[in-house]
Amino acid sequence: MTQSRRITIFDTTLRDGEQSPGASMNLTEKIEIAQALQELGVDVIEAGFPIASPGDFEAVREIAGTIHNISVCGLARCNEKDINRAWEALKIAKHPRIHVFLATSAIHREYKLKMTCEEIIQRAVDGVTLAASYCDDVEFSAEDAVRTEHDFLCRVVEATIRAGARTVNIPDTVGYATPAQMGDTIAMLCNRVPNIDQAVISIHCHNDLGLAVANSLAAVEHGAGQIECTINGLGERAGNCSLEEVVMAMRTRNDVYRCDTGIDSRRLVPTSRLVSGITGMSVQRNKAIVGRNAFSHEAGIHQDGMLKERTTYEIMRPEDVGFSKTDLVLGKHSGRAALANRAKMLGYRLTGEQLQQVFEDFKKLADKKKEIYDGDVVALVEQQLHGMIDECWKLVSFEIISRTGDMPHVKMTLQNGGQAVTEEVTSSGGPIDAAFRAVEKITGLPLACKDYQVRSATIGRDAQGEASLEIEHDGRSYRGLGVSTDTIEATVKALLNAVNRIAVMQKAPANCGECERNDE
Ligand code: KIV
Ligand code: ZN
């Protein structure tokens, strides 16, 4: 039997994933995710783009100082200022990696960079040489490689390997490739670049045509040794290759790919939940591997087959990707130890203080609802983890009158520091609009709602409602999450969660002048 090839998993949830509109995370949240990624078993964490903002710099530096078992990577454009800043953030890491990128396709050369092929090669070589003077582990990305002429791509790859790149990444920046084309491109590089054996070929696929996972697998089949991916497939536009899907495809179809990774697959669902809780980007129910329905069998014929022999309709076991085997019920008389145990089984690590808070919420919920399912525990824990920000504004009380034929009326009291403020609002737009207006009036913040969803955390009429929303304020997006058996209260909590994120951002230090985010 041929041996499995070990594929490096490069996770970019904290960099490309954070580029998903509305998915920005604060420092504490990024560290929490980095720790979960280390436990999951990824090989490299791309922690951010240090030149982009003081927040990105700080996050890369903190993660570099916290994560010791795996590589921590920072992104930089191919210029001195970016690379120096990246190294400044990374230098305390035990295993630092500098990732420099420069676009190579004709479209980018002509319209964005206004540079000739010779200038691109020189810039790429200079960038890699500078990065390699700081650390051994340097990755070079030829941005928009998939739309780059093959002859030129070969020259860039050869020159950057000669300059010291240990990994050469071939991004499908715009998600344009097809699997056959991607496979051919990687095979072509393996055949034509004379020093290709001195570097690992990496793949970085975007999902604009829904082909990111298929393209990454095709690249691996033809010789790529590293996959760049994100939890839940987060990322620019339609996102990146989904880590959980690509890993489970290689594991489940090892007969085809003959590849494996260092991922502990039982941590996939908990990590997915952590990321969706923090970013507020919920996972669609039918998402492969980690969606709620991924292992649910609805049709009678399927259920019958499953009862006779699981493998009739199941190619993976739910417990192998981290779904708990049973949905045990907790209730009013369950103690803190039972709750802690359940949260642990579901994959969460809570501090004593977090557990105490979740336990208090659990007791309140148990007074309203007889049976508490895993979904309820997940919702309470995620609300707690997601709400780990300074609570500038707190909900004291609200009252909503919504009557057929009348305009809804809201009376709301919020507290900021020691001061409570009450406002009353009547709105023709419905009770949710009235609640938004009351929060705007009290906080003085204009809040444009870009996305708003409520879904039930579990089955049953007494299920908790999980509200998630996206607010735009001052040109930036902020997400909020709130949970309650009263869906309007869940919405108000979600709104305050987003408002508190705005308040945190307003307190953050202004741009230091070292920081910029543009594409050359
Ligand atoms: O999509 C892309 O090209 C990127 C590079 C910076 C690797 O994200
Ligand atoms: Zn990308």
Image (spheres, helix red, strand yellow):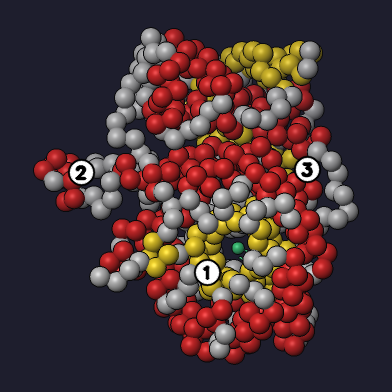
Cα separation between marks 2 and 1: 38 Å
350 vs 475: above or below: above
Which residue is pictured at 75% across the width and 50% down the height?
Answer: 57
Q: Amino acid at mark 3?
A: Asp
Q: Residue furthest left?
A: 308
Instruction: Assign a secondary structure to mark 1.
Output: strand
Of tags 2 and 1, the one toward the viewer is: 1
Tell me where residue 252 appears, x and y as whole percent.
31, 58
Which residue is pictured at 77% across the width and 25% down the height?
Answer: 443
Q: Which residue is mark 2?
A: 299
Which residue is pictured at 80% across the width and 28% down the height?
Answer: 444
Q: Which mark is residue 474?
A: 3
- Point out the tag, 2 or 1, that comes first from the N-terminus: 1
Which quadrant: the C terminus? bottom right
- Point out the tag, 3 or 2, that comes first from the N-terminus: 2
Q: Amino acid at mark 2?
A: Ala
Which quadrant: the N terminus? bottom left
Q: Residue furthest right?
A: 513
Q: Nearer the viewer, residue 100 or 499?
A: 100
264 vs 332: above or below: below
30 vs 134: above or below: above
Instruction: Assign a secondary structure to mark 3.
Output: loop
Cα separation between marks 1 and 3: 36 Å
Q: Which residue is mark 1?
A: 203
Tell me where residue 211 appears, x and y as whole percent.
45, 66
Which residue is pictured at 68% across the width and 30% down the height?
Answer: 389
**Residue 103 quadrant:** bottom right
Cα separation between marks 3 and 2: 48 Å
Relative horizontal placement of residue 414, taking residue 216 as reference (left or right):
right
